[in-house]
Image (cartoon, coloured by chain):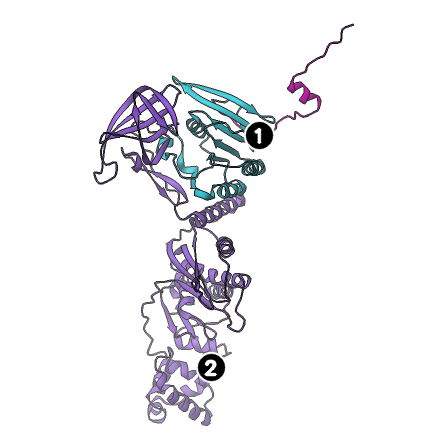
Amino acid sequence: MRIVCVKLPKHSDAQAIAEIFYRATPQIRLRHNDAIFLEVSKCQHMYSETTFIKRAHITLKRIGVTAELAVADDISTALSLATFPVITKESLPIDSLVYYADPLAQYPEQHGLILKAIHLLKSLRVRTVTDFLNIPSYEISPRFGPILLMAYQRLQGQHAIPWTEFKPREIVEEIHEFDLAYPPRDLEPVYFTLRPLLDKIYLRLRGRGQRVRQFNIILQQEYATRKSPQTYEVPIIIQLPFVSVKTIFQIAKEKLDAVVQRKPLEHPIVKISLVVTEEAPYLTSQRDIFDQKKEETSESFFHLVSRLATKLGPDGAFFAHIKESYLPERTWFRVPEKTITAVQESHIPERPLRVLKDPLSIFIQDNRIVHNRVHYEIKEWKNQEVLLSNWWEISGGERVYYKLVTHTGDNFWVFKNKEQYYLHGIFE
Amino acid sequence: MKLQIAKPSIAELRELIGATKPDDRPRHSFSLYPSGFATGSFIELTGSQRTEFIALFLREHPELKVAWVEDSITINPYALKQKGVSLDNILFVEGKKDTPWCLSQIIGSGCFQTVITENSRFNEKDLRRFQLLSEKAQNHFFLLSADPAASWVPHLQLKVSKTAGQWNVQALRKRGAL
């Protein structure tokens, strides 16, 4: 078993950082917010230990975390090597017994006892763990207590710590609280904070094999006012996959700018949080190194679609997915991503190129139809077709469709339902 | 001796002042309009069969990446498919009140070779912007209008109709080398 210990600086969110590494290994344990332990022996076919450490350093740097990393055969040794500036287990100082006695910091009430025992060992000139291991095992418990016996046995490779299931948080959220002494009054400092937060969210979701599809940026002002609430909530929609963080940031910045321009901030901002409201599977594809232009075009296309979706809503920019149905309103639906459909032969009669969202009630009298205040004289009624729709809909029940050919060359698609005529489409 | 005043045609005058330049822009051929459509051109289509006309153009060029922008979507993708149009390369955009903004973004992105929209209260400034952007991005900009616009912006205004299966394509106005 090979364990990588990521020793984090104070006030880190270990759970969130651990989620980033969930992609490399599902065997993860945390020591509160101090350290993350990753069991990497199963992913050695993909990365060597050195590569893994290098990649981990880059990933942590990207989210602005400076951590100490060490690899060892067990959790306690990995943690000790990450904490103390030594290379081998044998040269670890006696202070590292804290990590052997309680590696996951599960028994804080016993820490006093451990420190007392370490102090006693130091007074006996036991400086390293090698010195400690020279003491016969039967003398450990009566002299230093059972807790150090546990540490002694762990040093000898016994009492392995079981791996419990690591569960990523259900809600992916990143929060940054600004210094209350100097809270920002405009968006510029917010953007500086936003980029690392986006990076972190992107990596956390990537760790679970997902990507962000929709998220909210919540800006909290210092005070609420009568006119406006304390928080600004700005939804961002990333319609298509493979959009880089840079693009997501540009979209978010654009949207925030527009929102704040429309409704200016009234008080300084004290907190910014990003909450992912919708995820989608992350589908990996190999980069086409021979056609860089294609990659760039795809990226700009995804950027454009996401910007449109953020401005217009998720249904604003879409591809059409075809479904065979006699009812014209059910022959296609909107899909955010391109779907490849098998080519099917259509057995449905010709449909008009323009179909109104809601059929328009019209009057037909003396073979004349009025549409957009223009009178059309009907030349021919043809292509009669009877369709049945759901009875609970406005124009439900039986619909008898006709293609009306006018003298001006216009072709209307109308139907008769309950003695009333409706215009449903135009053969344009 | 009687003085004779020669009345040259507009085309001759244009040639005399060097206003006619050979158009070397790439063109997309079209069976219903044999001279084809040059890239970077603003084409206004009017007439009763304008949507079918553009559908047939798309059928002949399935490789073109298309953005179809409308205030409120009335185009029927199923009917487009029945006409033989491949829907894989068509992005539909329902711009609502932001249609001019959407069009500027779409044309300016350079991701699409053809942009199609319906005339929805665009002012002269909007149309001019679309024209300049489509010239820069080298794409076709098709404006579908019920009636021909009085604007000078379109390079080409076509009135299309179909009677008894026969297409009638009438060029109302041409500007530049189109």
Determine if residue A246 is in view: no
Drawn colour of chain A?
A: purple
Q: Nearer the viewer, residue A309 or A418?
A: A418
The residue furthest right is B1
Residue A123 position (above or below residue B54): below
Res A422 quadrant in image: top left
Separation of residues labelled 1 and 2 (CA atoms): 84 Å
Q: Position of residue A373 (x, y in %)?
A: 39, 28
Q: Which stretch is magenta?
A: B2-31
Residue at mark 2: A92
Is residue B25 magenta-colored? yes
Q: Quadrant of the N terminus of chain A?
A: bottom left
Residue projecting furthest to the top: B1
Using the rendered view, name the quadrant where residue B177 is placed: top right
The residue pinned by badge 1 equals B152
**Letter of the chain in cyan:** B
Question: Picture quarter containing residue A231?
Answer: bottom left
